[in-house]
Image: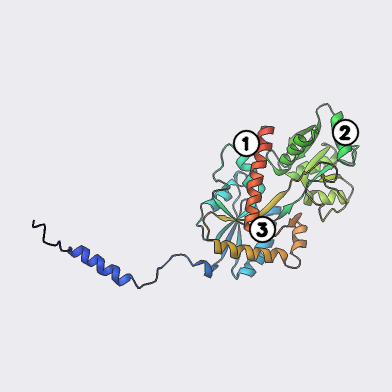
Amino acid sequence: MDPTRPTLPSRRQLLGALLALSCAGLPTLSVHAQPSDFPTRPIRLVVPFVNGGVTDTAARVVAEKLGERLGQSVIVENKPGAGGNIGTQMVARADPDGYTLLLAYDGTLVINPNVYAKVPFDTLKDFTSVGKIGDATLIIVVNPKVPAKDFATLKAYAQQQKDGLFYGTAGTGSTPHLAGELLRQQTGIPLTHVPYKGGSAALTDVVGGALPMTYAAVTGAAPFIKSNMLQPIAVSSAQRAPSLPNVPTLIEQGVKDFEFNSWVGLMAPAGTPAPVIAKLNDALQKVLRAPGMAEKLSDLGVVAMPGTPEAFGTEVARELSRIKGVVETAKIKLE
């Protein structure tokens, strides 16, 4: 071959070049709507628990108003199983387009990764925060026959018991269980955990006198407190619960910096476009600040906590680390 002779392009190369030129002026097509158009179809909100619970009811209250703000329906879909891990994994694997959201709950996102040997998602890597909905306040209550009216007298009574003071919760690895463990570690109060299959069963036994104490959600305990069937000791939130304004916090009773709440919020799959997250968060803030919404959530035992995606993400990361320390000290593990 003569090295001075130019090489002519092949027929395939010529066709490829012509095709590239013909498409150069065409707009790029995408199977997804652009963030500026979001949303153009209904949004799915996955609740990783059965319907009827506080998390599910809170999700439905918010979803209805969120849909009105966004101009598209927000449909709640219950996907229970494995302590919330199944539904949470479903969202982690969903397309990051804003059309599949997770009803985020402390039990699944910060407790499960620490108490289960293995979970099918990574809280920090697989999700993007949309925003917090609110805190569900926890409360310590005892049977009225227990000689305690506040935390100081409760601790003194517990120290007199040979095996410590037995307290029931919704189960091993539940938020109240972890709250009780942190209280024991931080104050030295001798507590012995009794796991139940649900918080209502523990409440029933405390009301009946079969168990002296329970750590529970305010929403479940409040009716028994108001009818004098349970004696409230303290709430573990930073502020008093709106539904029980006469019950002091643990902080007020000298337990420094003690705050332990259950919470709910919204998460999206990691990689969801920032403009979509911003639009979802803006709608959520307007919903939470709308007249009557705080009262609706309060009836469920949830204190509305509007905020930015960044603030919610920071809180989740901080709680994930804090719970790890509590779990490791208490040696709590679930298979």
Determine the image quadrant of residue 30: bottom left
Find out whether the residues at labels 3 and 2 contact each other: C-beta distance under 8 Å: no
Residue name at image x 63 percent, y 34 percent: 333
Of tags 2 and 1, which is closer to the observer? 2
Q: Residues within 10 Å of mark 1 (few under 14, many from 20)?
A: few
Could you say which is closer to the camera, residue 225 or residue 119? 119
Extreme residue toward the front, this view: 4
Residue name at image x 64 percent, y 44 percent: 320
The residues tagged by marks 2 and 1 sit, at their Cα atoms, a distance apart of: 32 Å
Residue 40 in view: no
Extreme residue toward the left, this view: 2
Question: Which mark is on residue 334?
Answer: 1
The kind of residue tagged 1 is: Leu
Secondary structure at badge 2 equals helix
Determine the image quadrant of residue 285: bottom right
**N-term mark: 3 or 2:** 3
Q: Residues within 10 Å of mark 2 (few under 14, many from 20)?
A: some
Residue under pointer 2: 156
Question: Which mark is on residue 59?
Answer: 3
The kind of residue tagged 3 is: Ala
Q: Position of residue 209 (x, y in %)?
A: 85, 38
The residues tagged by marks 3 and 2 sit, at their Cα atoms, a distance apart of: 41 Å
Residue name at image x 74 percent, y 38 percent: 182
Residue 249 is left or right of residue 33, and the answer is right
